[in-house]
Image (spheres, rainbow, N blue to C red):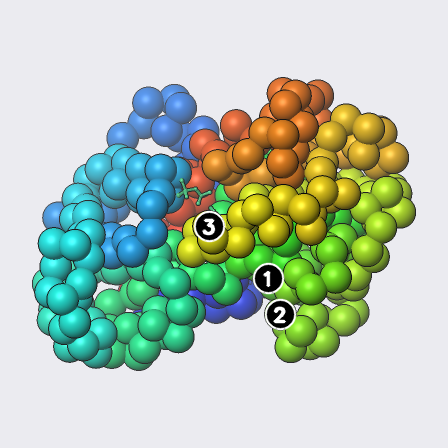
């Protein structure tokens, strides 16, 4: 297979995405049975993280260890990248030494530039615009609990952020309806929305939006890098909390997801993570299994 990157979900075809999700479910059950599977023995994954992370970092590092490989966590504080070495040079050098590179950064264009100059697969571990690895886990989780998401109604409540943009891509690839309920001024990418008008549309009123929802998803009101807007956002988003009352308007077998970390009392009520519809802990665990499936897809199909 030619060199493949995973910068957005649309770097996979619908078929490939479905296969990666299926494979994640198999890898999860094999892992739980204690079966050792080491397809990445002697392979190395570099992780360049310019923003904080718990789930993404730990799931990639654990996944590489379980696959018999190893990982290198590179904080910009300790590398020349953080001292201004050009992205192009860093990409050329690092990709001569490791087998894949995972990057969490601010501007999506920085990730794209790195990938352009990398000789090995580059994986988006979150940018300001997209968080495709999270969608792998979310789609795996829906599949495990309710089967195919095709034709279902998914409702995004809150900020039209990197997660919301990635849900638009997922709606297109997996053929579901995405209703976005965001306050005015906080819509997702207009270009992305226009390009996917068949699958995604906006309904401002959250109560109306969640009617007959099969899945409700939210995320923090202020993402990493927007900390100084926190107070303004708390006010602008006050009508956009996911809580048991809002969930009562959804379908009786609806699910609730949140990529975490969550701010209880803001985008969710105190009790929402433990609500009967919540699958957030499975969702978090599935970061491990779905990213192992992604690494296998990118590195073992060559
Ligand atoms: N959901 C997610 O990406 O979590 P982290 O920021 O902890 O990696
Ligand atoms: N939208 C959040 C997701 C965190 C996993 C952020 O970018 O901070």
Q: Which mark is residue 227?
A: 3
At label 2, counting other C-alpha atoms closer than 10 Å, the crowd grade (few under 14, some 14-19, many 20 or more) is some
Distance, label 3 to label 2, CA atoms, is: 20 Å
Q: Is residue 58 left or right of residue 159?
A: left
Distance, label 2 to label 1, CA atoms, is: 7 Å
Q: Which mark is residue 165?
A: 1
State the residue position of label 2.
Answer: 189
- Report whether the residue tagged 2 is closer than 8 Å to ligand 2: no
Q: In this view, does 47 lie to the left or right of 258?
A: left
Q: Do the residues labelled 2 and 1 touch (CB within 8 Å)?
A: yes
In this rendering, the answer to whether 197 lies above or below 56 is below
At label 1, counting other C-alpha atoms closer than 10 Å, the crowd grade (few under 14, some 14-19, many 20 or more) is many
Asked whether residue 80 is in view, the answer is yes
Q: Quadrant of the N terminus?
A: bottom left
Which residue sits at x=31%, y=64%? 122
Q: Where is residue 162 in the image (x, y as percent from the top left)?
A: 53, 58
Which residue sits at x=73%, y=30%? 243
Judging depth in this view, the residue of 21 and 119 nearest the camera is 119
Q: Position of residue 207 (x, y in %)?
A: 86, 42
Which of the two labelled residues, at mark 3 and mark 1, occupies the earlier sequence position?
1
Residue 116 quadrant: bottom left
Q: Where is residue 197 in the image (x, y as percent from the top left)?
A: 76, 71
Kindly report which numbered mark, 3 or 2, lies closer to the viewer in this rendering.
3
Q: Is residue 184 left or right of residue 191?
A: right
């Amino acid at each position: 297979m030619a060199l493949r990157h995973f910068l957005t979900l649309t770097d996979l075809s619908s078929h490939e995405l479905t296969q990666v999700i299926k494979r994640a479910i198999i890898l999860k059950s094999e892992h739980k049975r204690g079966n050792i599977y080491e397809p990445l023995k002697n392979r190395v994954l570099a992780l360049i993280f310019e923003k904080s992370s718990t789930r993404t970092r730990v799931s990639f590092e654990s996944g590489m260890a379980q696959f018999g490989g190893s990982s290198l966590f590179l904080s910009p504080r300790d590398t020349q990248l953080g001292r201004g070495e050009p992205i192009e040079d860093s990409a050329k050098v690092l990709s001569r030494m490791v087998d894949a590179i995972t990057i969490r950064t601010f501007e999506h264009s920085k990730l794209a530039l790195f990938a352009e100059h990398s000789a090995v697969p580059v994986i988006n571990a979150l940018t300001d615009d997209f968080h495709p690895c999270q969608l792998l886990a979310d789609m795996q989780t829906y599949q495990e609990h309710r089967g195919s998401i095709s034709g279902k109604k998914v409702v995004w409540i809150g900020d039209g952020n990197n997660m919301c943009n990635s849900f638009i891509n997922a709606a297109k690839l997996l053929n579901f309806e995405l209703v976005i309920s965001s306050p005015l001024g906080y819509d997702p990418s207009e270009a992305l929305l226009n390009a996917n008008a068949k699958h995604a549309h906006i309904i401002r009123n959250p109560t109306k939006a969640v009617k007959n929802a099969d899945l409700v998803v939210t995320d923090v009101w202020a993402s990493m890098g927007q900390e100084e807007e926190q107070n303004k956002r708390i006010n602008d988003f006050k009508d956009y909390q996911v809580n048991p009352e809002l969930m009562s308007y959804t379908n009786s077998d609806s699910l609730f997801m949140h990529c975490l970390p969550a701010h209880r009392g803001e985008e969710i009520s105190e009790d929402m993570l433990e609500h009967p519809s919540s699958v957030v802990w499975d969702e978090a665990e599935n970061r491990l299994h779905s990213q192992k499936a992604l690494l296998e897809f990118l590195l073992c199909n060559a």
